[in-house]
Image (cartoon, grey):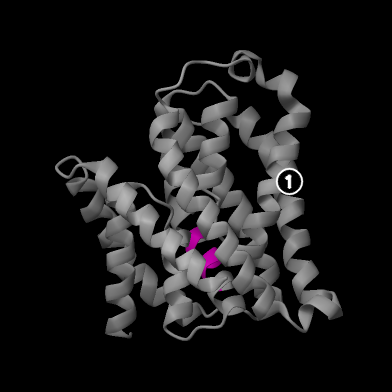
Amino acid sequence: MELEIVVMGFLVGGLVGLTGVGGAALLTPVLMLIGISPSVAVATDLFYNSVTKLFGSIQHIRQRTIDLTLTKYLAIGSVPSAIGAVLLVQAYPPLAAHQDAIMKHALGVVLIIVALATIVKQFFTKLGSNRWQDMPTESKKGLTIAVGAALGFVVGLTSIGSGSLFALAMIYLYRLKAAQLVGTDILHAFLLVTAAGSIHAIYGNIDYLLAANLLVGSVPGVVLGSRLSAKVPGRPLRTVMATLILISGLKLL
């Protein structure tokens, strides 16, 4: 057990619990900052997220706070797309030779998008309904699969966006209760990151010891952060976190 990694996991978990900002957007750039290669950072983060999302999914399944139809259509698009993104940079020789550089720059772009999305998301809930929200999910099957495919490719390449970007899309396109939004987002994210992480595992990119140390710290961190979230003003803290993520993204470009 490495105390520094455990502490880092605790801090990241605490911030996730406090702000709801995606752990991958915080963790992946930090792993790269301490010298972890982009491919290992992305793969390890996907595995780490898979474990954490599993427990959240089980809880939401018990609570029946998941839109299974929406989850199914999103996964139909996102899972194959994420797998394709991983295979593209791992198995296609012209890209595989430069995979770390590709992942680093892709991370920079996606972190900037996630930072802006995090800020926008704080104001989206105040907007009125639109024609997309008023349509039944079955009528948006093609659109839902397409959204899943587009964002799934991003997650497969960078490990980032399984929560933040998909949550923003669901807020805008679907009419869900708050608990349903969270539950659907978590279950779909579990399916997505598990699929992408499994391909990385085949190529030996996951540092399981690193992930275990992060989990030891992050689990109590998330619990503590979640308990404190009711006492800490969320919007200013989320804005600060989004600014830090934005700076991280710019540095990676």
Q: Residue furthest right?
A: 93
User: In the image, what residue type sits under mark 1?
Assistant: Ala
Q: Position of residue 197 (x, y in %)?
A: 62, 65
- Quarter of the image for residue 87 reads bottom right
Residue at position x 57%, y 16% from top? Answer: 130
Q: Position of residue 201 (x, y in %)?
A: 65, 74
Residue stretch rendered in magenta on the structure: 44-49
**Which residue is nearer to you in this view: 108 or 71?**
108
- In the rendered image, the quadrant that contains the C terminus is bottom right
- Quarter of the image for residue 124 reads top left
Q: Is residue 114 visible?
A: yes
Taking the magenta stretch, the answer to whether it contains residue 201 is: no
Residue at position x 52%, y 15% from top? Answer: 129
Q: Is residue 235 above or below residue 92?
A: above
Q: Seen in the image, is 82 located left or right of residue 95? A: left
**Which residue is nearer to you in this view: 132 or 229?**
132
Residue at position x 37%, y 61% from top? Answer: 244
Disc 1: CA contacts within 10 A as few (<14), some (14-19) or many (>=20) = many
Residue placed under numbered mark 1 in the picture: 149
Q: Position of residue 215 (x, y in %)?
A: 38, 68
Q: Position of residue 229 (x, y in %)?
A: 22, 45
Taking the magenta stretch, the answer to whether it contains residue 48 is: yes
Q: Main secondary structure of the magenta part?
A: helix
Q: Is residue 98 above or below residue 244?
A: below
